[in-house]
Image (tube, helix red, strand yellow):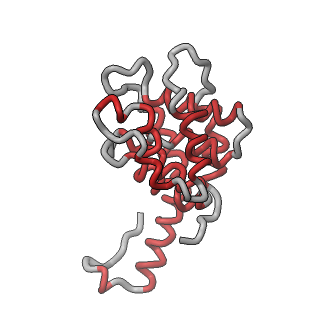
């Protein structure tokens, strides 16, 4: 494999950066495959749950699919908790950052905020504010995020639910991640 000639970025030539750009584009094109591989390894969970993180993700995406959500939203439902393994304290923002270049503003916002919205179901049991989501009640995607959580996310911890497989979602994950990135 070719490599750059520089050891400091400021010393790089156009040839160096064209080479790096070529490799970066190839790497970007493999994003969907890396995500699917990572998801396939989410076979463990935090203690106490009846299902794995992977199964939770599959259930959430299957419910979105069953409700005939857009492909973008189904992929978002599949990946909404991908950050749990590496960023448990800000998993929603982590997942949203992964999706951001490939999804609409609405889908990004729903994923980014779903963690705060999910607190409605449990925060009061821990002495915390279950209505933290209310600070967003005038936001244009508030109702959409409520529905995401109520219909798909919070209901997806059922060991008896029949989910689609990760392989079933592979074509739409690859389709979404092969899109031309949205402008930032």
Residue shown at the point (44%, 85%) measured from the top left: 14
Give left or right: position of 142 versus 37: right
Relative depth, front residue between 53 and 110 = 110
Q: Is residue 117 above or below residue 54?
A: below
Farthest-out residue, top? 160
Q: Position of residue 96 (x, y in %)?
A: 48, 53
Q: Position of residue 100 (x, y in %)?
A: 52, 59
Residue shown at the point (63%, 30%) measured from the top left: 62
Q: Is residue 15 above or below residue 85?
A: below
Give left or right: position of 112 versus 49: right
Count the labels in the image.
0
Query: Quarter-wise, where is residue 165 in the image?
Result: top right
Q: Is residue 22 above or below residue 14?
A: above
Query: Quarter-wise, where is residue 164 in the image?
Result: top right
Residue shown at the point (60%, 44%) measured from the top left: 75
Q: Position of residue 106 (x, y in %)?
A: 60, 57
Farthest-out residue, right? 68
Residue shown at the point (46%, 74%) measured from the top left: 19
Q: Is residue 10 above or below residue 181?
A: below
Q: Position of residue 51 (x, y in %)?
A: 44, 21
Give left or right: position of 42 versus 111: left
């Amino acid at each position: 494999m070719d490599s750059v000639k520089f050891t400091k970025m400021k010393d790089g030539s156009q040839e160096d950066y064209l080479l790096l750009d070529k490799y970066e584009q190839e790497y970007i094109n493999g994003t969907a495959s890396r995500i699917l591989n990572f998801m396939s390894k989410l076979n463990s969970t935090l203690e106490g749950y009846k299902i794995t993180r992977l199964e939770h993700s599959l259930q959430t995406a299957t419910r979105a699919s069953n409700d005939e959500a857009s492909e973008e939203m189904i992929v978002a439902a599949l990946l909404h908790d991908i950050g749990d393994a590496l960023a448990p304290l800000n998993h929603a923002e982590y997942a949203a950052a992964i999706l951001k270049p490939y999804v609409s503003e609405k889908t990004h916002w729903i994923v980014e905020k779903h963690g705060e919205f999910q607190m409605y179901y449990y925060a009061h049991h821990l002495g915390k504010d279950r209505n933290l989501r209310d600070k967003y009640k005038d936001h244009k995607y508030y109702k959409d995020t409520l529905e995401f959580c109520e219909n798909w996310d919070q209901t997806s911890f059922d060991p008896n639910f029949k989910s689609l497989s990760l392989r079933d979602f592979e074509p739409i994950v690859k389709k979404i991640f092969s899109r031309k990135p949205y402008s930032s």
